[in-house]
Structure formats: structure tokens, C-alpha cells
Amino acid sequence: MWDERFEELLRAQLPFLPPDEELAADAVLRDLGLDSMATVDLLSAVEQEYGVRFLDESLNMSTFATPGTLWAALSSMMEPA
């Protein structure tokens, strides 16, 4: 699963997710209120927080579909080379 920082960054962009509701790995982020502007904000926040840069091939709707897919993409960038 992901760390607390990731969940905080994600929750900040999900207006339809109640604060006391669990964020499931397979939750559809668009259904929770992640629109295009929030996606850009989230991308920027994640890159800054984790010191990574998403490559162009990662900048697609499938990467930002669920918390699980986004965490998997982020995790792969943080793995030591």
C-alpha cells in the first residue's frame, strides 16, 4: 500500500471523498472528483513531494485512474536504479 504523504496529497484533490471514508486502491478517482485541473495540481504536488518527474508516457488517464495505478507508477520511479 502507499504511505501517508501520498494519501494526503490525493485526498486534497478529491472533493467527493468524505474525510472519514477509506480510500480504496481501486477507487475511480474521477468519480471522487479528480478533474483535469486537479490532476495537474496532483501531478505537481506528487513530483515535488517525492522528487520525481513523470515521463510523458506516464501522463495518461490510466496512470491517474485509481490510487493503486498512480501509486504503482510513482513507486516504479522511486525504485533504486
Image (cartoon, rainbow, N blue to C red):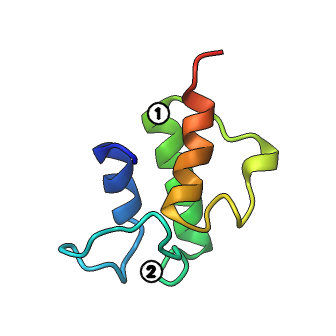
Residue hosting label 1: 50
Task: Count all numbered tags in the image, as a single digit.
Answer: 2
What's the residue type where badge 2 is placed?
A: Leu
Residue hosting label 2: 32
Residue 37 visible in rendering: yes
Name the residue at 71% across, 67% down. Answer: 61
How much space separates mark 2 and mark 1, taking CA atoms? 23 Å
Q: Position of residue 24 (x, y in %)?
A: 39, 68
Whether tag 2 and tag 1 are in contact, CB under 8 A, the answer is no
Regarding mark 1 in the picture, which secondary structure is present there? helix
Name the residue at 34% across, 64% down. Answer: 11
In this rendered view, identify the residue nearer to me: 77 or 13. Answer: 77
What's the residue type where badge 1 is placed?
A: Tyr
**The C terminus, quarter of image:** top right
Residue closest to the far top: 81
Regarding mark 2 in the picture, which secondary structure is present there? loop
Residue 73, relative to residue 33: is it above or below?
above
Q: Residues within 10 Å of mark 1 (few under 14, many from 20)?
A: some
Q: Position of residue 49 (x, y in %)?
A: 43, 37
Q: Looking at the rendering, which quadrant does residue 14 occupy?
A: bottom left
Name the residue at 70% across, 64% down. Answer: 62
Q: Position of residue 53 (x, y in %)?
A: 64, 35
In this rendered view, identify the residue nearer to me: 27 or 39. Answer: 27
Q: Position of residue 13 (x, y in %)?
A: 41, 67
Name the residue at 52% across, 67% down. Answer: 38
